[in-house]
Image (spheres, rainbow, N blue to C red):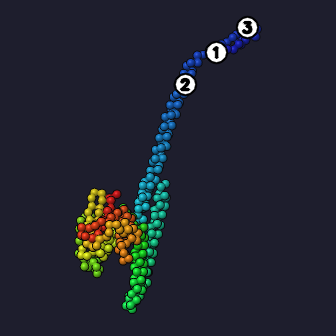
Amino acid sequence: MLERRVAPDSNGPGVLVQLAQDRAPLAAARNEFGRELALFLGVLWLVLSAAAWLQVRLGLRPLGRIRGNLPLLRDSARARLPEAHLREIQPLTEAINALADARERDLALARHRAADLAHGLKTPLSAIAAQSRRAREDGAMQAADGLDRAVAAIRRTIDAELAHARAATIRRAPGGDADVRTVVEQLVTVIEHTDQGGQLAFTVDIPPSLRLSVQPEDLSEIVGAVLENAARHARRQVRVSGHAGPQWTALTIEDDGPGFPADRIDHLLSRGGRLDESGSGLGLSIARELAEATGGRLTLSASSLGGALVRFDWSAG
């Protein structure tokens, strides 16, 4: 309540004026306004938070697609990121693809240099081999044997390093599509024209429809290393079989040679592992490294032919 005393007439008596109001409706109105404002602000916060989350989610979706495609670049030097539809993401995609281009060029250059080095060493090795033959003809058998061992060791090292360089450049590229039977038949045709291969019977039991998500030249190098080993140690026959299931593809190479001791399998598949100084087993370690580079797996066991069985397995994923 408010009150004031006023004098309407300077000569008259004073008047006391009082004004009173019930504050309960005002307090109720203020409290109701506060509740409505809090509810509105709460709903506004939820809406703005959802809008911000949605904006960030949609804005980062192109980056998520780029992240999902990065394993392709890791698995294959030939893979590239697809073109981005957003102008803001396009520079990032182009920069990553440019980096992939540079990486592929560097790998190709390293591979060519390794191949050039290998070819460059062939002439000196041939000269050393000729010196070894002359020394053997002159009766210096011990010196000739030493030269032969040195030449064989150098050749094994060259072959292994070339295989390692090749494994660094091949990965399971999405565009790979090899006709397995055609690749194997081409390799068999080449080996049959060698001295050892011409005396063997080759059996190829692969369905014409069998295909593998690997580049044909990569599959040729993988299978070729094992076929050469099989032809080197087989007595009369070599058998190549292939089959596939819904999520896997398998390729086996068997021979009727002496096989290998079960306790030496891990050593054979190790880098540079072999059974003797002639280099037996080197092709297996090279083949395993190349197979793993394409997403495959190599295992060894005994063959029903009496010799060794080499099996390659590739999953569909």
Where residue 76 appears, as percent x and y from the top left, is: 41, 63
Q: How many marks?
A: 3
> In the rendered structure, which amino acid carries the disc numbered 3?
Pro
Neighbour tally class for label 3: few under 14, some 14-19, many 20 plus, Cα within 10 Å: few
Q: In terms of depth relative to the viewer, which is nearer, 80 or 208? A: 208
* Residue at point 49%, 61% (across, down): 95
* Residue at point 47%, 44% (across, down): 53
Q: In terms of depth relative to the viewer, which is nearer, 244 or 201? A: 201
* Residue at point 42%, 65% (across, down): 77
The residue identified by callout 2 is: 31
Q: In terms of secondary structure, where does tag 2 sit? A: helix
**Which numbered marker is on residue 1?**
1
| Residue 171 visible from this viewpoint | yes
The residue identified by callout 3 is: 13
Determine whether label 3 and label 1 are within 8 Å by CB: no
Q: CA distance from mark 2 to mark 3?
A: 44 Å
Sequence-first tag of 2 and 3 = 3
Q: CA distance from mark 3 to mark 1?
A: 23 Å
Neighbour tally class for label 2: few under 14, some 14-19, many 20 plus, Cα within 10 Å: few
Q: Is residue 129 left or right of residue 254?
A: right
Sequence-first tag of 2 and 1 = 1
> In the rendered structure, which amino acid carries the disc numbered 1?
Met
Query: Between tags 3 and 1, which lies in front?
Result: 1
Where residue 80 appears, as percent x and y from the top left, is: 42, 62
> In the rendered structure, which amino acid carries the disc numbered 2?
Asn
Q: CA distance from mark 2 to mark 1?
A: 22 Å
Query: Between tags 2 and 3, which lies in front?
Result: 2
Sequence-first tag of 3 and 1 = 1
Q: In terms of depth relative to the viewer, which is nearer, 147 or 155? A: 147
